[in-house]
């Protein structure tokens, strides 16, 4: 391969400046690797191509985990948040999930400010068109401008840009996002090197001018009075808070949309890629749920200095005139004017069973994939993969073992294990239901679970680590206090009576009272003077600590049982299988099992149990063979 200009050598090169690329570059640079971030547009770091929101069900847990490990997504989110809500408060704490609506422009600008101030991070604005590979090992990249850069490791975080094709009705245009060029060359080269590639599809709704909408006829959805993602954020909201609004479609809207089905790239077979099951287009919803004549639409602001609104729930690739006609039949949008129509986009991805848990590819040494290139959807899933790829690329080139999180340790562990073990047949999105240990993996305890790892990796600095240790100390001391101190009936009975809870006739532990579902720790602080005085002695106390203590005490029995189950499964993950093991030697395995095991190459018995098509009897064969 001919290279026009040889530019510079780096430890790590990150290709792509999206959510995965930003976290990957920041992690690698912060760990001490000389890192180059190559992106086509430096004004769009971590661009929010779809909804300008971070978090949501399970996604919010991932963001708090990224923060606990020393990533930046949570910090950037808090600095650009225009509405924060804790979802699922009416359910158990295992599924409480934070979510922030963000100012799209400030989010990207915030990321750029962070990245440009990292001493070991450098930038190159260009399109990558090829990889330098020697003896099945990555050695660098080639760009469209004719530059070549050498590196010990390369991380591909290409998003929707590999072979990106935008669809609006029967019209198609090449692009990774609207108005931005697609990337060609990388997919073709990787396929020639033996990688399997596929096509996926995602989409985005129309953007509408807020001056042309009537919010008075919609249901207003305000945010919480306080809240944040990052464990470092202790102040109130930085930006003015904005409301979201809810309206809905109707049978009339659906009928108009159906008129465009004959020109839908989804239904005419033009789009070949597989779309996300859990974020379908409006035409998909109408077709799939034919018995429903109404669907909710969420009208969400794009920022504090713009009239642009995002129509959540109205993703579409129908002709733009059909989109506008239908939208104008929605209550409150009768006079709506587009900033731009919705569109679908097809792009190349690589089935993630071709990766190790470190996110390094199995075929090319020191080449890592992160984000949508692995078949995922969502900013949060991409950012988590980017962080882990950045960490592991640095560790690999420095001769260190991979950093891999278990399914019982983090949603990030669940995400990556699902990808590399099960693969994907549609864009992967994280849900709380994907995790077996939801009560262990709560959003309130992500720092307790992961901050020590972040500190050990060098991503958490000393000052923050001291803050964490102080919070942890206060948490355990308050738990002990609540478990060891009694309260008298004279003190607590008036309150218990007010919440229709049975009265106590003898002294009871504060923790016993707290176990009642109608009683909160804040309630007890307000009525029990010894508890109020104890809380007052804590100089770093905050609602987060009180909430964490309450959850821990109320659910301690469930937590202990789930931890015991996790420990049993963990033992299977300690039985190592050599990566070059020849499964054809074990004739007792089913043919399907041998094929699946040979393809995935699980590193442990635990991973083998999670491969679809590998039965319990097959696992027994492996256990016998490996001496257990």
Image: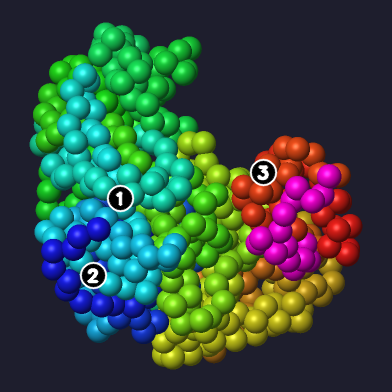
Dots 1, 3 in contact, CB < 8 A? no
Along the line of sight, the residue nearer the viewer: 108 or 98: 108
Q: On screen, 605 above or below 324? A: below
Q: Which residue is mark 1?
A: 186
Q: Position of residue 543 (x, y in %)?
A: 49, 71
- Please tell me whether residue 33 belongs to the stretch shown in magenta: no
Name the residue at 45% across, 47% down. 195
10 Å crowding of disc 2: few (<14), some (14-19), many (20+):
many
Quadrant that contains the C terminus:
bottom right
Label 1 to label 2: alpha-carbon separation: 15 Å
Q: Position of residue 273 (x, y in %)?
A: 38, 31
Residue 149: mark in rendering? 2
Along the line of sight, the residue nearer the viewer: 191 or 576: 191
Q: Which residue is mark 3?
A: 596
- What main secondary structure does the magenta stretch of the protein show? loop
Q: What span is in magenta?
A: 571-587
């Amino acid at each position: 391969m001919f290279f026009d200009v040889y530019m510079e050598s780096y430890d790590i090169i990150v290709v792509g400046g999206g959510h995965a690329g930003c976290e990957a570059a920041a992690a690698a640079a912060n760990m001490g690797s000389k890192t180059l971030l190559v992106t086509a547009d430096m004004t769009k770091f971590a661009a929010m191509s779809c909804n300008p929101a971070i978090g949501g069900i399970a996604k919010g847990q991932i963001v708090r985990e990224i923060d606990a490990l020393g990533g930046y997504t949570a910090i950037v989110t808090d600095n650009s948040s225009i509405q924060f809500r804790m979802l699922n408060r009416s359910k158990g704490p295992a599924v409480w999930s934070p979510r922030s609506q963000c100012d799209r422009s400030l989010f990207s600008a915030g990321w750029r400010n962070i990245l440009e101030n990292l001493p070991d991070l450098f930038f190159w604005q260009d399109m990558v068109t090829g990889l330098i590979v020697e003896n099945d090992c990555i050695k660098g990249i080639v760009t469209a401008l004719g530059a070549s850069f050498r590196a010990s490791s390369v991380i591909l975080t290409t998003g929707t840009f590999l072979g990106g094709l935008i669809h609006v009705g029967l019209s198609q245009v090449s692009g990774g996002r609207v108005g931005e060029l697609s990337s060609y060359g990388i997919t073709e080269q990787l396929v020639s090197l033996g990688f399997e590639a596929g096509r996926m599809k995602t989409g985005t709704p129309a953007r509408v001018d807020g001056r042309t909408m009537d919010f008075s006829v919609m249901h207003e959805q305000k945010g919480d009075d306080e809240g944040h993602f990052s464990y470092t954020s202790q102040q109130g909201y930085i930006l003015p808070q904005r409301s979201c609004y809810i309206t809905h479609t109707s049978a009339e809207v659906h009928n108009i949309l159906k008129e465009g089905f004959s020109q839908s790239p989804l239904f005419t077979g033009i789009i070949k890629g597989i779309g996300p099951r859990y974020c379908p287009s409006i035409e998909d919803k109408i077709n799939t749920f034919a018995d429903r004549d109404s669907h909710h639409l969420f009208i969400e602001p794009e920022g504090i200095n713009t009239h642009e609104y995002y129509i959540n729930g109205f993703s579409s690739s129908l002709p733009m005139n059909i989109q506008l006609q239908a939208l104008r039949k929605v209550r409150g949008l009768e006079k709506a004017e587009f900033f731009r129509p919705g569109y679908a986009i097809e792009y190349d991805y690589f089935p993630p069973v071709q990766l190790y848990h470190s996110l390094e590819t199995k075929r090319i040494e020191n080449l890592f994939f992160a984000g949508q290139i692995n078949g995922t959807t969502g900013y949060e899933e991409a950012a988590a993969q980017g962080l882990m790829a950045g960490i592991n690329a640095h560790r690999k080139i420095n001769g260190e073992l991979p950093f891999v999180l278990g399914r019982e340790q983090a949603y990030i562990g669940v995400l990556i294990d699902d990808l590399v073990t099960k693969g994907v047949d549609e864009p992967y999105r994280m849900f709380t239901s994907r995790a077996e240990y939801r009560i262990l993996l709560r959003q309130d305890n992500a720092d307790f679970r992961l901050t020590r790892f972040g500190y050990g990796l060098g991503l958490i600095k000393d000052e923050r680590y001291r803050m964490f240790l102080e919070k942890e100390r206060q948490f355990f001391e308050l738990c002990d206090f609540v478990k060891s101190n009694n309260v008298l009936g004279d003190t607590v009975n008036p309150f218990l009576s007010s919440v229709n809870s049975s009265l106590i006739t003898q002294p009871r532990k504060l923790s016993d009272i707290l176990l009642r579902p109608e009683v909160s720790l804040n309630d007890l602080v307000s009525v029990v003077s010894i508890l109020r005085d104890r809380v007052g002695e804590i100089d770093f106390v905050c609602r987060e600590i009180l909430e964490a203590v309450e959850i821990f005490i109320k659910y301690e029995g469930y937590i202990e049982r789930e931890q015991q189950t996790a420990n049993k499964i963990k033992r299977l993950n300690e039985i190592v299988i050599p990566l070059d093991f020849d499964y054809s030697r074990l004739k007792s395995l089913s043919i399907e099992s041998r094929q699946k095991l040979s393809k995935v190459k699980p590193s442990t018995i635990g991973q083998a149990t999670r491969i679809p098509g590998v039965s319990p009897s097959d696992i027994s064969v492996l256990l016998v063979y490996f001496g257990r």
